[in-house]
Amino acid sequence: MSTNKLDISLAQELEVLKQEGRAKAPERIIEQYLPPKGEKGPRYKLVGSDNEFIRLNSNSYLSLSNHTELAAAADKATHKFGVGPGAVRFIDGTFIHHDQLEKRVARFVEKPAAKIFNSAYTSNCGLAHTISNNKTHWIGDQLNHNSIIRAMRISNIPSVNKGIFKHNDMADLKRCLEEVVPGMDRVVVIFDGIFSMRGDYAPIHEINAICKAYDSKFKDGVIIVVDDSHGMGAYGETGRGTAEFCKAVPDIVIGTFGKAFGVNGGFIAASTTLVEAIRQKADTYIYTNPLSVADCAAAIKAIDICDSDEGLALLKNLKERTTQFRQGLERLGKESIPGPHPVVPLMVRDTGKTHDLVKYLFDHGVLVVGLTFPVVPKGDETIRFQINASHTSADIEYVIELLNHFE
Ligand SMILES: Cc1ncc(COP(=O)(O)O)c(C=O)c1O
């Protein structure tokens, strides 16, 4: 027995992906991190290149991944408790750091309780599993992240129990609420806080107001869930995300420790009963090993920093660098999608030009992501820039100057 025959079939499938333009490029490998020096923010060295790169494609918005206190917290936890939990949570794989992180993140997002997962991806899957039954109707934004869409699929939610509204279109959300089939016990409205390809945000205050009018129609009400993976830590006056920015309170908050907090892992924050239901029912929580104590200790430290004067200073720098970059694009007459989030899309609107610009930036030591069809519709080809708190004013000016000279 071998996988020879399977390999032939898979090779054909891979060829189709290539032909359709959906195959991913080979992965670049980072081999060195160079700390900030003088006017320069951090740089990265890649295997096979002599260049030093600025990363404008990192979700580590507060630049905490290389923070010495996070590394020290991870080290200390590891030396005390080891590198792995040895079992899932309910079979004595729960360590003090898991419990502390759950309490810390719940306090940060101002919810009574939280459960942590290996990622936001598995958090979404766990939530769908926990609160879905055959009388649950789900409504989501058309541009929701893959993890939300996948969560619906693995929870076997039939299409009659699902509605999709046009991106950020409140009239269309109302249509979805009107179209809920009779006899449903609960409606769950779920959406990204920040849409990661565009940097725009969901108007949670408006969504809340619309949903409120329908709440009494259903036995368990209309439940509002925001997956604020890109907003948490990076958005709002104190980094509490899109809900803070919109001055609104969603019922359930999903987030990641793998972006602004610079670590790894995800969470669901909600009522104590809902969180206990997750512990009892969510397969992606129950049947998989938890985060390491190192991840948890680093994430606790990241939240502590985010919640301190140092965090506010990082957030301030992040906002200033984002504004500087956006103003630079404006000066050059480049098209973007407005908004204060550090995801700044440059609308190129041409596939060839997008590829050329990504390569030009790479050749000049700048890492960015180009989004072309079929990832985005034809005509919406984009380069996604992501600003981080450790980028310096000189770094941003350098990139703007590069864009100025691109033919
Ligand atoms: C809205 C949203 N949810 C979930 C994720 C996945 O986060 P994680 O890496 O923690 O699984 C992302 C990341 O891109 C995201 O944008």
Image: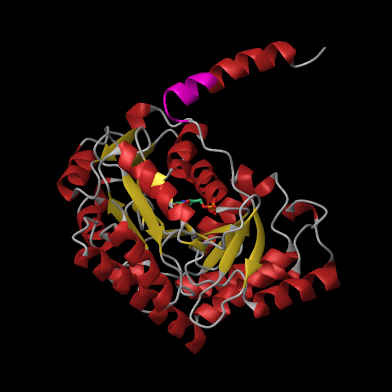
Q: Is residue 13 above or below residue 224?
A: above
User: Hey, which quadrant is residue 30 in on the image?
Assistant: bottom right
Q: Is any atom of residue 264 visible in this view?
A: no
x%, y% of residue 189?
33, 48
Q: Is residue 238 left or right of residue 122?
A: left
Q: In which quarter of the image is the N terminus?
A: top right
The residue positioned 37% from the left and 53% from the top of the image is: 384
| Magenta stretch holds residue 133 | no
What color scheme is it? secondary structure
Q: Residue at x 35, y 50 (%)?
A: 383
Which of the 4 quarters of the picture holds residue 13? top right
Nearest to the observer: residue 225 or residue 79: 79
Residue pictured at 29% horizontal, 73% vertical? 323
- Image coordinates for residue 363, horizontal then vertical, percent: 48, 53
Depth check, front residue: 329 or 178: 329
**In this rendering, does residue 54 appear at all?**
yes
- Residue 334, horizontal then vertical, whole percent: 22, 57
The residue positioned 51% from the left and 86% from the top of the image is 310
Name the dominant secondary structure of the magenta segment: helix
Residue 56, quarter of picture = bottom left
Compared with residue 254, is residue 128 higher up or lower down, i.e. above or below? above
Q: Give the range drawn in magenta.
A: 15-22
